[in-house]
Amino acid sequence: MKGDLTVSIESWPIAGGFTISRGTKTEAVVVVAEIRTGAHRGRGECVPYARYGESVEGIRDDIEKLTDRIATGLTREELADLLPAGAARNAVDCALWDLEAKEKGVSAAKLAGVGDMKPLVTAYTLSLGTPESMLEAAKKASHRDLLKVKLGGDGDAERIAAVREGAPDSRLIVDANEGWSPANIETLLVACAKARVELVEQPLPADSDEVLSDIERPITVCADESVHDRASLTGLSSRYDAINIKLDKAGGLTEAMAMAEAARADGLRIMVGCMLATSLAMAPALLVAQQAEWVDLDGPLLLARDRDPGLRYDGSEVYPPEPSLWG
């Protein structure tokens, strides 16, 4: 698919702040790839993640190196051979999907064989804080169907109990962001089960999660940092019950859809998640999320402002994208 490539770095302020076990952010910095062919353009957005050795400038440079290949024609299959799984490939892959949909006059969902898309219930994230602050945050968000609770180690049993008190009727999932240890994981899993938590993401560091094969798991344990693309699925089902598919890790929509199919064949359940980004990054993920058990695509809800047009959020539901945004 021949086209002219432009790459831009954008900063989107976060409403308040966003805290996880690794620190606090006040802005979401994204890289956008745009490919134009005549009257049509395709866009893709990614979030470089330092956890995986990515930087904003490095990802921009990696995408710009594809300028000549895109000018002479580049397929998604060829892209997978040129870039590894990660943020850069995600932005370009999603831009190619968007462009093909625009050129053919059909939706990206139809191109992908997804069928008619429906609104989905998305989680709403509560930042890591003291039990008292998280109780208040839970009360304010208690009208939402599904809450995702950021935890981080010491004091997590008290935090999750406080959230359950503040939101007695909401479904709860937890993201520990590798913040637990073999010494406390069983106690914390029990505390989560007591609070009626459905799922906990990545409780242990990705390089030391072997203990998960040997302990009782009273709730669903979901891999996040321990899984990226199909290659990383090998042997995962002995330690985890589910995986969190993020397009920035998988390297785009193409790999994410193949990954979901492979994970289900291994008996793993599916969560579709996101980095802190705008609706442009969430839109392609909604295609994968159509068949997921848990959806966490609330990035735009945590920003002070979103793209215009952006995705439509109505309470806890997020609606399929309009073509003017993506796909």
Image (cartoon, grey):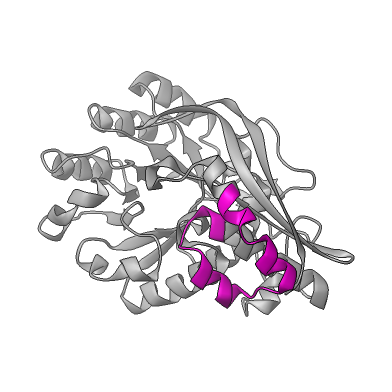
Does 82 sit above or below residue 61?
below
Residue under the point 65% across and 57% down? 283
Horizontal placement of 2 versus 287: left or right?
right
Kindly indicate the quadrant of the structure image that contains residue 35: bottom right
| Residue at the extreme right | 39
Residue 274: image x %, image y %? 51, 50
- Count the marks: 0
Does 321 sit above or below residue 302?
below
Kindly indicate the quadrant of the structure image that contains residue 238: bottom left
Residues 5 and 127: in front is 5
Q: Split into 4 quadrants, where in the image is the C terminus? A: bottom right
Residue 122: image x %, image y %? 55, 51
Q: Split into 4 quadrants, where in the image is the N terminus? A: bottom right
Does 171 sit above or below residue 288?
above
Residue under the point 35% across and 59% down? 227
Q: Is residue 115 visible?
A: no
Does 206 sit above or below residue 42?
above
Residue under the point 24% across and 45% down? 205
Magenta region includes residue 236:
no
Residue 49: image x %, image y %? 46, 44
Residue under the point 49% across and 67% down? 256
Q: Give the magenta range.
A: 61-89
Residues 289 and 27: in front is 27
Residue 153: image x %, image y %? 25, 32
Q: Is residue 103 visible?
A: yes
For the stretch drawn in magenta, the main secondary structure is helix
Magenta region includes residue 66:
yes
Residues 292 and 262: in front is 262
